Amino acid sequence: MNYKPKFLLIALSFFFCSSQAQSVKSQNENIWLHFVGKNKLNEKLSITLEATMRYANGFSEKQQWFIRPSVDYQFAKSFAGSVGYSHYNTYSYGDPTMNRIDTPEDHVWIQGTYVHNTGNVKFTHRLRDENRFVGIAKYNAAADAFEIDRYEYRNRMRYMILATVPLWKKDNEVKVSGFVGDEAFINIGSNAGKTLFNQNRVLLGAGYHFNSNHQIQLTYIDQYIWNYGNTLQERNPTLRISYLTTLDWSKKKA
């Protein structure tokens, strides 16, 4: 497999974010509370539920919440495919704010995840195609307020690369791991907006493994966001606190 295009995409994302640093109009210090629960039905088929509550500027402002169920199939040891749905609600936060009012959004998406090892480093490549239906706000003169008038279709591609290394083992099991990576959100299609990038996230973190099924992670994320018209850009230093769990229901039934 040729990884050059993928690494080129990541390099371009870093370059693009750096070139935009002087144009940032808004900054928020975020805290994200995050949950991922994978439920294995058998060796191939799983159901995953992901959910989050996000805050801006400490816990002083609600930023966003979403719920994201998916069905996952393990085609091979190194490759899995998923089909999923996401529902978001993004609040009006920050100064200046990117959204006039609370904005709903629904996604139908597919993704592929490829994992491989080089020495003791595990590389995860994730590519997701999101079909987005975004609530569009319109001013209602009679009510003297904005309201969601319609939903607009937009398409977005997300590519994440993550390198994970074991930092501490006990009884030959990994107890603490570290990871670094990047995720680029690319606008595509006829209704893609004014920028190539919708978001970019640089990730650095560590995870504590209670056992093979339960893990807690702390991640620092340097998040960049460009709005649809490229009139406002955010750079948000973010702390994400994640709890990850895997339950094998096929073994429980047996």
Image (cartoon, helix red, strand yellow):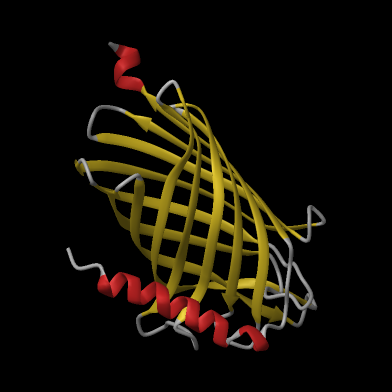
Residue 136 visible within the image? yes
**What residue is rendered at 48% in x and 82% in y?**
15
Which of the pair 1/31 is nearer the observer?
1
Q: Residue furthest top?
A: 254
Give percent across and percent down for residue 146. 72, 75
**What residue is rendered at 30% in x and 27% in y?**
41
Depicted 75 relative to depicted 223: above or below: above
Image-quadrant location for residue 103: bottom right
Which of the pair 59/110 is nearer the observer?
59
Q: Residue furthest right?
A: 60
Which of the pair 67/176 is nearer the observer?
176
Q: Identify the image quadrant of the N terminus.
A: bottom left
Give percent across and percent down for residue 192. 43, 82
The image shows a total of numbered marks equal to 0
Give percent across and percent down for residue 87. 51, 54
Depicted 48 relative to depicted 151: above or below: above
Depicted 195 relative to depicted 110: above or below: below
Q: Identify the image quadrant of the C terminus.
A: top left
Residue 229 visible within the image? no
Image-quadrant location for residue 227: bottom right
Depicted 221 relative to depicted 12: above or below: above
Horizontal side, residue 181 vs residue 83: left or right: right
Give percent across and percent down for residue 178. 50, 46
Horizontal side, residue 28 vs residue 1: left or right: right
**What residue is rendered at 22% in x and 34% in y?**
44
**What residue is rendered at 47% in x and 64% in y?**
182
